[in-house]
Image: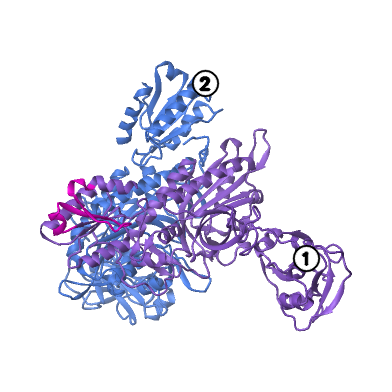
Chain colours: A purple, B blue
Amino acid sequence: MRMSKRFGRTLRETPADAEMISHQLLLRAGMIRPLGAGIYTYMPLGWRVVRKIEQILREEMDAIGGQELLMPVVHPAEVWQASGRWNLVDDTLLRFQDRTGHDMVLAMTHEEVVADLLRREVDSYRQLPLMVYHIQTKFRDERRPRGGLIRVREFMMKDAYSVHADSDDIDAYYPHMIQAYQDVFARCGVSPIAVEADSGAMGGTGSHEFILLNEGGEDTVVLCDACDYAANTERATFVKPGQEKTPLRPVGEVATPGCETIEEVARFVGVPTSQTLKAVFFATEEENPQLIFAVIRGDLEVNEVKLSNALGGLVLRAAEEEEIRAVGAVPGYASPMGVHGARVIADDSVHLGSNFVAGANREGYHLTGVNYGRDFTAEIVVDIALAGDGDRCPRCQGTLRVKRGIELGHCFKLGTRYTERTHITYQDANGQEKPMVMGSYGIGVGRLMSAIVEEHHDEYGILWPASVAPYTVHLVSLASEGIVAERAEMLYQRLTEAGVGVLYDDRPDLSAGVKFNDADLIGCPLRLTMSRRSLKKGGVEVKPRNSGEREVIPLDGVEAYVSQVAQA
Amino acid sequence: MRMSKRFGRTLRETPADAEMISHQLLLRAGMIRPLGAGIYTYMPLGWRVVRKIEQILREEMDAIGGQELLMPVVHPAEVWQASGRWNLVDDTLLRFQDRTGHDMVLAMTHEEVVADLLRREVDSYRQLPLMVYHIQTKFRDERRPRGGLIRVREFMMKDAYSVHADSDDIDAYYPHMIQAYQDVFARCGVSPIAVEADSGAMGGTGSHEFILLNEGGEDTVVLCDACDYAANTERATFVKPGQEKTPLRPVGEVATPGCETIEEVARFVGVPTSQTLKAVFFATEEENPQLIFAVIRGDLEVNEVKLSNALGGLVLRAAEEEEIRAVGAVPGYASPMGVHGARVIADDSVHLGSNFVAGANREGYHLTGVNYGRDFTAEIVVDIALAGDGDRCPRCQGTLRVKRGIELGHCFKLGTRYTERTHITYQDANGQEKPMVMGSYGIGVGRLMSAIVEEHHDEYGILWPASVAPYTVHLVSLASEGIVAERAEMLYQRLTEAGVGVLYDDRPDLSAGVKFNDADLIGCPLRLTMSRRSLKKGGVEVKPRNSGEREVIPLDGVEAYVSQVAQA
């Protein structure tokens, strides 16, 4: 490719609204261009990187028996209504009507379509297990697109779906997928950590996310500093500090004037926050909202995702003050005692301690000596606490650290949630009808491209790993005519014919500095510079992008040198 | 790929609503599946065909300097408003709003986005010419999707766009694109004819369509039976029969009671229809519609596309009776004489003859002796006539035939229509700002796949050309255990490792007949059958899909045999 004809110019200035380094560099190198908020064109150089990533994805998916297919981007609403997600998903699912007034959606994911296909195409245990995948454009109407390709609205995903006869079979298959994902990432030059993940609205029985630690990422993960425990924040567990149990005392009431936070109450009453209970109110996103009364020890925070999961996946929002008062609770002084019409869910920390201080449901008063079982009960008692920095590791008691990262991929065991609901069944060897067990696995292609740049750049530009570089060689000619230009042209032709990807800077009237800056910005692994000086020294100057070392090698040794770099 | 695990079953029955043979066979072979009206999933086998077509497209586009990129499917309305097509295109352009109420469209084509990119990325004559292309999903909200992949709503296009400094440059480039298209079609085993085409709403200064003659097609083309003249119906010209000119007579009025058609009028008055003028009324699709009064000789028909082009691309509809009366015309007896407030456009046939019979703008009466120039004039006099079967060829006077066909591709010279309107300019060598000259070129990938099936099938199924076959070899094992199964398995492994695409029918409990039927239906170029009988004869039976001849060849000769077929 000749730089003189390349579609997509390099930019000297860093675009003002680009915060993440990958966003800046992909724009500046002319690899992507925005068309609208969260909607990008992949320019020719960027698209070459995507195609190389796609190829790696195809090879790894094919290696574990994947069958590639292509599903539609526009879906009739019916398939989303059948799965229940038409109502469950918020406005990120873009709904519209076609010319006949028929409800449609822009696909943000394809479980529904896969399910629809499975119902028609698979009926026997002999056809299982089965894995299909696709690499295609999807759309999420994100409220706040950001970070270039990190969180977009129109995006490209490699999504895979597997179906199995039973959970033993998916358990046996799942590690192969995890390994394939790790191989994909390794080949692309990134090393995300596989963390236990919450599968959230996806349902399911186990899942992992691949998180690349990065300060600019929007996911948070919890990591142990002593063992390899890693989980996303929604899912992370921790050892809740015990609280000495004392003989049960009767319930008393104390005035707590002006105490607005749990810390103030604890200080006023003279107990640690771990000897208090706090109430947090949520309401369900339903036509007739239910009030959810979450009770947790005062030193802990409620993890809304765990709470939602405890309730079978209900979508929650913070409750309004009048909703809270309607069940007999007093905001700021709420107690699970004497509340009617709310669903009470307690964190299991209510068992760790005794004689808690809790609200009195009376403005300005709290109760002392409150004990679970004797004074109040909950519909569900389960872990609904949020892990925080400094908490104890559930595996080794080491210290947990909360870090930010970019989610590059996920693997979800979905169990039979979709398949039961939408009657995706097969006949087993005995002729019995059973729901298939399903798995769903995704990698964001554009996000992966950004992540590679996050990991491989310096102050001058990108350093593409050879596996995904748009071109292996960036050939700079320092003259536009005469022997130097002739030799450069000849080398360009020769390497191109040998199948080497060459970006050839044949532009006239530009200084060496400008050309070298562009080469550094674009980031091909190997720069070759043809100049009067290099020819005098007997050849062409080579400089790997990832080192400052330059040497002149003879022209007939270039192919061998390049093939070394390409394989590295 | 093992048939036992293949996702996508074969169907015995022809689906009831599939009329075209390609639709029937692609469904029956499990290559495509409908999700909604005009919305299809490409199943793994069908997707392999698409990927091979894509590869051919890439190679041919790259060979003429194309730079591949990927543009968004969802566009903000602004780019379509800037080009004017937001208002110009009907409901086939799917418009919707995002979560913030912003107007968006699903892209049906990408001239607008390319224009937007060109404006930002190209400013110098040094960067021209330039050709970019993309292969991606687009959406047209067709009123009546039909024919499987022939007319869909969601479709995949290879679209290319070129820009040039001037029309000489695009004239020099254009034949390369035409040749590349012919090469693509030849490699895919289809031979559409290149016809002169009208570029319609695309604007432009010249264009071709590639039409595969086919009774089930929805395009009509006009072909000369003597020379190679070929044009689509909208564009076709023909030699209009002359009409003897007689000395001008004064205008007279005759009663023509009960004459409702031009034929009845001509018979009643005693002249051939070629000595009458007829009026056809249209209205523009605008808020304040203009009335268009088209005048044409009575033996000819108005070509609405030519008429629209004569009016600079106005979108037209048939006029309502009250709109016609409002300008002083009387439906059925309308005359261009005495009409006010309508734009009168005349076909140039008004010059071919004299003393015409025309309406009198009075119920039940016609005028005689009507002559253009003396008695009426038109704002524009130009060819707006529709060519029909039996008309004379404009090149050689041969007989024109009207045929149906499938449009597989198009090449449009757009001129500077878009680029002027949207200020896509460059600086020439003298620093002068000039609009770029643009071309647009498309091939429908799914439609091409269907067309291949239309051309390559027999009563039993598809006969894929080797270049696009999902697999080269369909290996049938007639036993599921013992030596036959072992040898089949071994051959499958061996060929797969050698890089040969093999669809391996390893299904137990199925008869040879069922397996052979599936092989014929799916249509891989070469069937290999492993059986006790073939092994006794020293190897495996080979049968090319396109011949009835079977022979047994030794197992160690299979690779050589297969590579012959793959190259054929």
Mark 2 to mark 1: distance in Å?
65 Å
Q: Is residue B359 above or below residue B189?
A: below
Residue drawn where x is 63% and y is 62% of the image: A88
Q: Nearer the viewer, residue B99 or A556?
A: A556
In the image as oriented, which residue stretches furthest toward the bottom?
A258
The mark lying in front, picked from 2 and 1, is: 1
Residue B159 position in % (x across, y down): 34, 58
Magenta segment range? A530-558
Residue identifier under label 1: A344
Question: Which of the 4 image quadrants contains residue A456?
Answer: bottom left
What chain does mark 2 sit on? B
Question: Which of the 4 image quadrants contains residue B494?
Answer: top left
Residue A325 position in % (x across, y down): 77, 77
Residue drawn where x is 34% and y is 67% of the image: A28
In the image as oriented, which residue stretches furthest toward the top?
B536
Q: Is residue A359 above or below residue B393?
A: below
Residue B63 position in % (x across, y down): 25, 51
Q: Total label count?
A: 2
Residue identifier under label 2: B482
Residues at discs 2 and 1 both on one chain: no
The crowding category of the residue bearing disc 1, from other C-alpha atoms within 10 Å (few below 14, some 14 to 19, many at least 20), is many
What chain does mark 1 sit on? A
Q: Nearer the viewer, residue A435 or B30?
A: A435
